[in-house]
Amino acid sequence: MRRLPRVSATPVPGLRHLVLLVSAIVLSDTIFYSAVTPLLPTYAEQHDLGKTGAGVLEAAYAAGTLVAAIPAGMLAARVGMRWTVLAGLLLLGVASMAFGFADSIVLLDLARFLQGVGSACSWAGAFGWLVSRTPASRRGELIGAAMGAAIAGALLGPALGAVAEGVGTEPVFSLAALLAAALAFLSLRMPRPGHSGAADPRSLARSLRDGRVATGMALVSLPGALFAAIGVLGPLRLDELGAGAVAIGATFVLASTLEALTSPYVGRLSDRLGRLVPIRWGLAFAAPVLVAIPLPETQLAVSALIVLAAPAIGASWAPAMAMLTDGVEARGVSVALGFSLMNAAWGIGHVLGGAGGGSLGDAVGDVAAFAVLAAISVAVALALRRVRSLQGRAAAEALAS
């Protein structure tokens, strides 16, 4: 079992337990977010959905996160991070149960949307809580540890969806209520969150003037869009090649496993080498893999390419989130509001990637759609290399003067 990075280098009372709680919260969120992946072909057949309709169902969760992102951050900063976490867990549990019992595409879309609203609250509160008690020198590492748990949730979600395909969605998704209740109880026993900075529209506007915040948001949106597009086009491509829900679920389980194992180390690398370095490397590796995904005519080859793409794309998560938080904190703005910006950025990327990826696949085919994703990855990697070059030149000029 993967161990969380040690937190003893900078002793903070209760920090290890808080890392575990935040990890469990984001784990539960992503389990019920990603459980739909192996079920997409079944829902598409039952409700006569094309790739566009399947993309809308997949993206409805992100749409809820996007709509609720800023209000959730405001709520966490004003009412309290703990109470915002509790509200988010309650809504996530109820909406997940409703998803399991829904019998129409409208109800399925609505339940996914409400899941996303609950997730926006729990993520803003939980990550704001963690960062408020975390030394700045360990930020990338501990965010990476919590993101490793989120990725593990993405690992378990497809497996849960595959189980739901076999035994029924009603009992499987009803587990969400029990899990949410347990996490809510544990939240009440954690140390209080640290100081929260300002949280109002003016402070929000002030934070957006920091380049690290804008860049961090963009670099959270990108992997959100790439993963969402793969989450729609990948299962449908595997279904075309004859894969069932179990095989599709296994593919995404393996992909998430590899991504989860690398996430804490990517975060630590960003603490040491700078936030942009692992992002640039990951995108450069991801581009040729994305181009190749729709080309093979065998399930095994397509699955292997999806597994390889996951850690490369996921290398953006922890560094981008840490960069965004660095900028927000430097402006004296609530870290909870910072993570609400992260939620908004992820929601934008995921809505565009899920719905847009499905529409693009319908319009021009999978080969062209994945080529567009690869081209975007290359363009961003080159832009980040240019930014790093300019930063190095500016530092050299400062030393010379």
Image (cartoon, grey):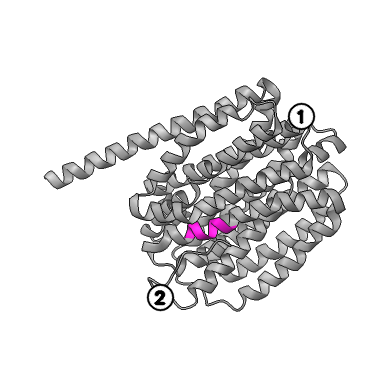
Check if residue 68 falls in the magenta segment: no
Q: Are marks 2 and 1 in contact (CB under 8 Å)?
A: no
Tell me which secondary structure the magenta stretch mostly adopts.
helix
Residue 225 visible to an observer of this rendering: no
Name the residue: 66% across, 62% down. Answer: 88
Q: Which residue is mark 1?
A: 240
115 sits to left or right of 147: right
At horizontal 46% and vertical 30% (from top left) the residue drawn is 378
Are there few (<14), some (14-19), or many (20+) residues within 10 Å of tag 2? Answer: few
Q: Residue at x 46, y 78 (%)?
A: 13
Task: Left or right? Give the position of 369 relative to 386.
Answer: right
Identify the magenta region.
Answer: 143-149
Three-letter amino acid code at disc 2?
Pro
In the shown orientation, is residue 318 left or right of residue 81? left
Tell me residue 36's x, y (percent): 74, 46
Q: Residues within 10 Å of mark 1 (few under 14, many from 20)?
A: few
Which amino acid, by three-letter code, is at mark 1?
Glu
CA distance separating discs 2 and 1: 53 Å
Q: Secondary structure at mark 1?
A: helix
**Residue 11 got which mark?**
2
